[in-house]
Image (cartoon, helix red, strand yellow):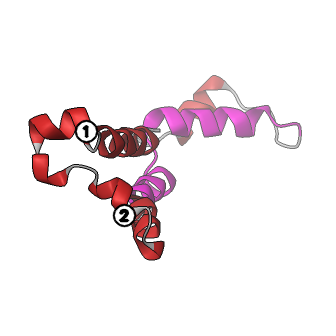
Amino acid sequence: MAGLLSLIIYYLSILGLNTQAISIVFQNEARGIVYDLWNIDYAWILIIMTPLIALLPDYTFLCCSQIFSPNIITKFRLLSESSSSPSSAPNTHQENNSKLKY
């Protein structure tokens, strides 16, 4: 969710900072560069794909950490889901607590 929000902020800042009124204040030389790049075939692909590729290591690390070392809330949720399934035998509260590793 944070990655998606950062991408939205990134694209809004690119489009906003390249407008005539704002670019005169911050950097007059960069006025309209992104709009000029939209006319080049490969440039707009790079503008869209580079941030997505840059977020891949963060997304991979997040997924791996959630799979291989989940926090205590995730462990408890998974244990409660497995104990509430009809195919498993009913567990007591003490059995669930003994399965949790802190």
Instruction: Say which residue appears at 48% left-offset and 55% top-offset.
Output: 63
Determine whether the residue tagged by mark 2 lies in a helix, strand or loop.
Answer: helix
Residue beneath disc 1: 20
- The answer to whether residue 57 is visible is no
Q: Residue furthest right?
A: 86
Residue 39 location, quadrant: bottom left
Which amino acid does the dot numbered 1 rest on? Answer: Gln
- The boundaries of the magenta stretch are 58-86
Taking the magenta stretch, the answer to whether it contains residue 74 is yes
**54 up-or-down from 74: above or below:** below
Q: Compare marks 2 and 1 and give the one earlier in the sequence.
A: 1
Determine whether the residue tagged by mark 1 lies in a helix, strand or loop.
Answer: helix
Residue 95 location, quadrant: top right
In this view, the residue in front, 62 or 80, is 62
Residue beneath disc 2: 37
Residue 10 location, quadrant: top left
Mark 2 to mark 1 CA distance (whole Å): 16 Å
**93 up-or-down from 40: above or below:** above
Which amino acid does the dot numbered 2 rest on? Answer: Leu
In this view, the residue in front, 35 or 67, is 35
Q: Position of residue 91 (x, y in %)?
A: 72, 32
Instruction: Say which residue appears at 27% left-offset and 57% top-offset.
Output: 33
- The answer to whether residue 78 is visible is yes
Q: Residues within 10 Å of mark 2 (few under 14, many from 20)?
A: few
Q: Residues within 10 Å of mark 1 (few under 14, many from 20)?
A: few
Q: Position of residue 94 (x, y in %)?
A: 59, 27
Q: Which quarter shows the C terminus?
A: top left
Count of residue discs: 2
